[in-house]
Image (tube, rainbow, N blue to C red):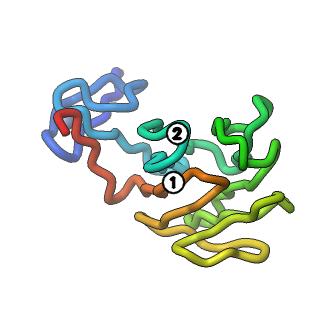
């Protein structure tokens, strides 16, 4: 039996391995896996989108990280985002320039919600959770 992912925006049936709807470009969801994304709003990588689909994700400048962001003010291993019991947490990994969430520097970890703004180095990053994210292709 062929499994399909049904788009929540236009109801188009997509192949199960698709990440985005081929009809309308909306992000397709998978229920039991973490699925959210980071969108760079400002900084060297403005416009880039990083999909979070693992439970443990490290963010940093070095290529060994799950999410590599090119920004000279970001540490080689800067922070991590962990998916724990349905919630996303960001954790500062003793970075040089800190982790700022919604204008506040965090000490240790902080919970992320859809729309949370994360500042790492000179980059401003929006955390977008799957349940409410709608990606438009014709912006
Ligand atoms: Zn669609």
Q: Residue at x 81, y 42 (%)?
A: 76
10 Å crowding of disc 1: few (<14), some (14-19), many (20+) = many
Q: Tell me where residue 37 appears, x and y as whole percent.
A: 48, 47
Q: Residue at x 34, y 39 (%)?
A: 28
Q: Which mark is residue 125?
A: 1
User: Does the numbered disc 1 mark a residue whose Cβ is under 8 Å from ligand 1?
Assistant: no
Q: Nearer the viewer, residue 34 or 39?
A: 39
Q: Tell me where residue 122 appears, x and y as whole percent.
A: 60, 52
Is residue 65 placed above or below 59 in the rendered structure? Answer: above
Q: Nearer the viewer, residue 85 or 60?
A: 60
Q: Is residue 55 left or right of residue 33?
A: right
Q: Which mark is residue 50?
A: 2
The quadrant the N terminus occupies is top left
Q: Quadrant of ligand 1?
A: top left
Q: Which mark is residue 23?
A: none
Which comes sooner in the sequence, label 1 or label 2? 2
Looking at the rendering, which quadrant does residue 110 occupy?
A: bottom right
Looking at the rendering, which quadrant does residue 100 occupy?
A: bottom right
Is residue 94 placed above or below 21 in the rendered structure? Answer: below
Q: Residue at x 70, y 46 (%)?
A: 59
Tell me the element at label 1: strand
All told, the count of numbered labels is: 2
């Amino acid at each position: 039996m062929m499994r399909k992912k049904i788009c929540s925006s236009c109801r188009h049936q997509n192949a199960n391995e698709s990440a985005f709807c081929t009809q309308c470009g909306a992000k397709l969801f998978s229920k039991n896996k973490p699925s959210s994304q980071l969108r760079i709003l400002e900084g060297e990588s403005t416009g880039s989108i990083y999909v979070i689909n693992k439970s443990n994700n490290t963010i940093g400048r070095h290529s060994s990280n799950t999410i590599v962001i090119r920004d000279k003010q970001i540490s080689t291993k800067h922070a991590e985002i962990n998916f724990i019991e349905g919630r996303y947490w960001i954790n500062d990994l003793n970075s040089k320039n800190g982790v700022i969430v919604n204008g506040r520097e965090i000490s240790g970890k902080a919970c992320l919600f859809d729309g949370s703004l994360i500042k790492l180095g000179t980059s401003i990053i929006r955390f977008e959770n799957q349940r409410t994210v709608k990606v438009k292709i014709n912006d």
